[in-house]
Image: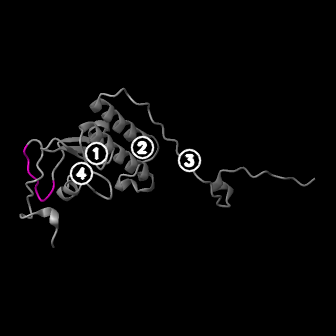
Amino acid sequence: MNRPCLGEDRWVNMTIIRADGVIPYNNYLWPTEWYHANSDLGHAIHGRWQFGIIALADGRFSVEGSVCAILANEYAGKPVVFASRHQALRIAAARLIRSARWSREWSTSFGGMNGTRLAGVINWIRCVVDRETGRPKSRTVHIREPKPVFIPSGLSLFDHAVIPVTRKR
């Protein structure tokens, strides 16, 4: 398997190094700053709701740990390397908020959320960005879920409806 981003050594690419001197392991760099919703909001939040950025040795910041993506500055058609820490934080947070909004369609075992839990995670993400970038606190997001569609069963006992009684006179 020939992948140009791997370079001479398949396991270490020395052109991409973290700011603290850590070299990639298995062609991946772990974040230097990492924020987890379940550690701040409680363990009822699925572990997938986290984001981080990687400070690179050349002064840039990445939102993706894959060395291939960092070298190409592209992952899934989107840029991953940014000149400033604030920009990288805001991009990483925006991508996590987008995923959180999509999670309404997922099963809860895969981290799916809706209603107040979804609003809580989105507000947490926005608070982290505001705190880390020195911006004033954002407005609180409220998520209103649509009313469930009522599908009558045909049985009044299950539909919680009162059947009017008509008397013959």
Residue drawn where x is 26% and y is 50% of the image: 80
* Protein image colouring: one colour
Magenta-span inclusion, residue 166: no
Toward which corner of the image does residue 57 lie, by quadrant?
Answer: top left
* 155 relative to 107 in the view: left or right: right
N-term-proximal mark, 2 vs 4:
4
In the picture, the disc for residue 118 is: 2
What residue is shown with label 3? 146
Q: What is the C-alpha distance between the residues marked 3 and 2?
A: 14 Å
What residue is shown with label 4? 64
Numbered circles on residues, count: 4
Nearer the camera: disc 3 or disc 4: 4
In the picture, the disc for residue 50 is: 1
Q: What is the C-alpha distance between the residues marked 3 and 4?
A: 34 Å
In terms of secondary structure, where does tag 2 sit? helix
> Which x, y percent locates residue 79?
29, 52
> Which x, y percent locates residue 115?
47, 43
Please state the extent of the stretch shown in magenta in the rendering: 21-28
- Identity of the amino acid at label 3? Pro
Magenta stretch, main secondary structure class: loop
* 59 relative to 114 in the view: left or right: left
N-term-proximal mark, 1 vs 2:
1
In the picture, the disc for residue 102 is: none
- Identity of the amino acid at label 2? Leu
Residue drawn where x is 42% and y is 52% of the image: 102
